[in-house]
Image: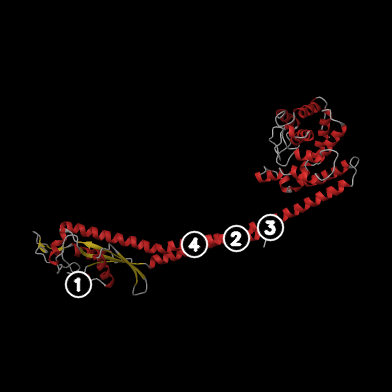
Amino acid sequence: MSSIKRNSLLLALLWTALLSVLLTVNINEVRDDPLQHAETQAKAVIKSAIGFRSWASHFGGVYVQPSEKYPPNPYLKSPDRDVTTTTGKKLTLINPAYMTRQVFQDFYGKDGVNGHLTSLKLLNPINAPDAWERDALLSFEKGSNHAAAIEKSASGENVFRYMQPLYVEEKCLTCHAVQNYKVGDIRGGISTSINLSSGEAIAAQNIRTIVLTYFSVWLIGLIGLFIFFRRSVQLEAEREQKFNLLNVSETLAHQYISTKSETSNLEEALQAISAMLEKRDPYTAGHQQRVADLAEKIALELGLSNDQAHGIRLASLVHDIGKIQVPAEVLNKPGKLSDLEFSLIKLHPQTGFDILKGIKFPWPISEAVLQHHERIDGSGYPQGLNADQICIEAKIIAVADVVEAMSSHRPYRPGLGLEAALNEISKQRGKELDAAAVDACLKLFNECGYKFP
């Protein structure tokens, strides 16, 4: 199994595992929502009921007109239970326990919410606890401050039950002193029951939506990974093809040049290689030829021998041969190169040297190709050489290369013109570019009337 396939499968498994964990966590959170909402609702119901009860205890109860729905409380043993106003209206006292029971009866008991006031020491049998409430009340006497459970209703639906204790207050003793209660004792408790069916239905719908969403995201991720896998395979095949092409080109270059004489046919061989390279890069067609011509003229202007100048010409003809390994889409890219793409371009001097180093030349052609992007201040590449470490051939080619490149059109910009190119090398004279080579180049254009062929 290739490393690309293995890594793609690993990424797919990691992607699936990550989404599975997130989906499980999300589903559990949504599944718990009805219970958490019911607990919050139950606490609010009990809190409001205790608030009403405390208010009524503070005033000893409230008087209302008795009716069939609100008859006098037969379990309230108080001489003031029933009174008649000065206008003859009869009233009965609604004590806190009676009020709490009526609040649950009249205002709750709807929308699946019910409440119940109960105790282990009863005055009113209606308030008798069921089995769960009895267990809760016993736990309160042992120190618990609440009880909660989920039970099944008669129709099979889940019901959340919650209960909190009620403590004896000073006002409570008015009615309950006969039961030997003291302030702070557990008087009883208020329980609530909340039907969970509607909340569970909403949660189930939300879970279905979440599962569908996660499945869509998972599928999109797998599609993206598949596209990445296919593209990686294609790029790997292209890299292998280019590597094979580079090896074949290097072998052919060695064989071809080795069959030629060192003088008369050598230039013909190097020009053939230069032409082969320019077939891949139409935007720089003729670039190496023009650089070769200018570099040779600069060498002669500097007083170098005809033989040395001829060697510089030949090195210039193949100074970009290393670009054979650079993808054509990078060489011909119309926009700005990325850092990665520029790093590929910067490899071409070393590649050119590797192609030419095994061929016996009477001139330092491979060294000139390796160093033609070095700068005398050490800012060049690939080795960051400075002035004394750069051969004269590379210094001359560097000047000619800058002038020709700036003058000509490129995929990412139009030609800047000869004047701009000459101004640039003047600025870099003695900084990045060799001063003598720059002076010779400027003299050729400004005084000798030199023009690119």
Label 2 belongs to which residue? 10
User: Could you tell which of marks 1 and 3 lies nearer the N-terminus?
Assistant: 1
Give the vertical position of 374 relative to 2 (above or below).
above
Label 4 belongs to which residue? 23
In the picture, measured across the screen, residue 336 lies left or right of residue 295, that is left
Q: Total number of numbered labels?
A: 4
Q: Which mark is residue 125?
A: 1
Crowd tier of the residue under label 1, counting other residues whose Cα lies within 10 Å: few below 14, some 14–19, many 20 or above: few
Q: Amino acid at mark 2?
A: Leu
Between residues 176 and 394, which one lies in front from this camera angle?
394
Q: Amino acid at mark 3?
A: Val
Q: Nearer the viewer, mark 1 or mark 3?
A: 3
Q: Marks 2/1: CA distance?
A: 69 Å
Whether residue 281 can be seen here = no
Q: Nearer the viewer, mark 1 or mark 4?
A: 4
Between residues 88 and 314, which one lies in front from this camera angle?
314
Label 3 belongs to which residue? 233
Q: Marks 1/3: CA distance?
A: 82 Å
